[in-house]
Image (cartoon, helix red, strand yellow):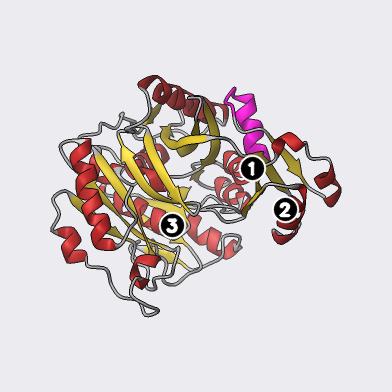
Amino acid sequence: MSGFIAPGATLGVMGGGQLGRMFVHAAQQMGYTAAVLDADAGSPAGGVAQHHIQAAYLDDQGLAQLAQHSAAITTEFENVPAPALRTLAAHRRVAPGADPVAICQDRAAEKACFARSGVPCAPHVLIDSADGLATVDAALLPGILKTARMGYDGKGQARVSTRDELRTAWQALGGVTCVLEQRLPLAREISVVVARGADGQAVHLPVQQNLHREGILAVTRVPAPDVAAELQHAAVQAALRLAEALDYVGVLCVEFFVLQDGSLVANEMAPRPHNSGHHSIDSCDVSQFDLQVRTLTGAPLVAPRQHSPCVMLNLLGDLWFRHGKQPVEPDWAAVLALPGAHLHLYGKAEARPGRKMGHLTVTAPSADAARIIALQAAQVLGIEAF
């Protein structure tokens, strides 16, 4: 991977979700055109790109079309098959590459990467058979059972306290290979978004403090109000070590748990921009999607500067069903009347409970002011206070 791909070229993206949509917007703002491969005719990214290739991720003809259109190709979805990225990489620049994406897709491989990089994570064990259930160390219970693959936003996991619950949960998850993690005493959750170029240069967004509900991100606050500077520095350094260990090119998010004793453990990685980094579009001079374009094209990386404290609220489809079974559009006018409110809707035709429909970032001169206004927005929308 060498050389700068100048504006005017077409950048490809595997996946048509909201992350792809925001990548396309960032690329177009810099003067690039975009091609999206996604089987959904109504995909959020496909609707704004100059080229929408309606094909499955492993469709040979679709991959050939994407390579033909694109000077370089990225991914917006962590579960894009690694073999598809390898196929594309034989013809075009691809970032991130298939190998680090494959590691991030497998919880067991991911935890092995944490260990190699000297980044602590929760005590855990791999369970790949019914016999393995009987030999689980009792110290890992209570725990959280997670499928090794294809789990995100709280899907593919179950909280278990006893061996009987563990067996029942493993069977309910389909008897697939899983990782059992010891349940730790959490104080809070944070994330770090880093961007690393092919030359090894790396930059990062400010540390983000996150609140999850039902396994889905609900609120992000930046600067992280309850995390000491030393711990923030440690999280950034751990994320940078992981990116280096993976020889990663692109945008990588690492989620961490802060334990009640003040220690830090890694939770998981996402080989793409992250929901918790969406605030950067409005709160920083360089967003995570700008960084994704830069790492893909070989443009210089500059460290993002946060110019406004902010709070980001996730807008789930549940907000459309506050008043009954028929969807009702939230009161966007009342939200937009609030100072510093930046509304981002993802162009999804149908609201469904749990579906990410958009996000709202509130920026203000101070963190306290941003929180006050964000709480007003939450009250308007019917989002639980934080």
Q: Position of residue 204 (x, y in %)?
A: 37, 31
Looking at the rendering, the stretch of residues picked out in magenta corresponds to 107-120
Determine which residue is flagged by label 1: 107
The amino acid marked with disc number 3 is His
Nearer the observer, 47 or 273? 273
Q: How far, Cα to Cα, is label 1 from label 2?
A: 21 Å
The amino acid marked with disc number 2 is Glu
Q: How far, Cα to Cα, is label 3 from label 1?
A: 33 Å
* Label 1 vs 2, first from the N-terminus: 1
Q: Is residue 244 left or right of residue 110?
A: left
Q: Is residue 189 left or right of residue 162?
A: left
Q: Is residue 45 left or right of residue 258?
A: left
Label at residue 34: none
* Label 3 vs 2, first from the N-terminus: 3
Q: Are marks 3 and 2 in contact (CB under 8 Å)?
A: no
Q: Residue furthest top?
A: 230
Predominant secondary structure, magenta span: helix
The reply to whether the magenta stretch includes residue 140 is: no
Q: Position of residue 172 (x, y in %)?
A: 71, 61
Q: Is residue 353 above or below residue 289?
A: below
* Label 3 vs 1, first from the N-terminus: 3
The residue lying at 37 percent from left, 32 percent from top is: 207
Tell me the crowding category of disc 2: few under 14, some 14 to 19, or many 20 or more residues within 10 angstroms, Cα based.
some
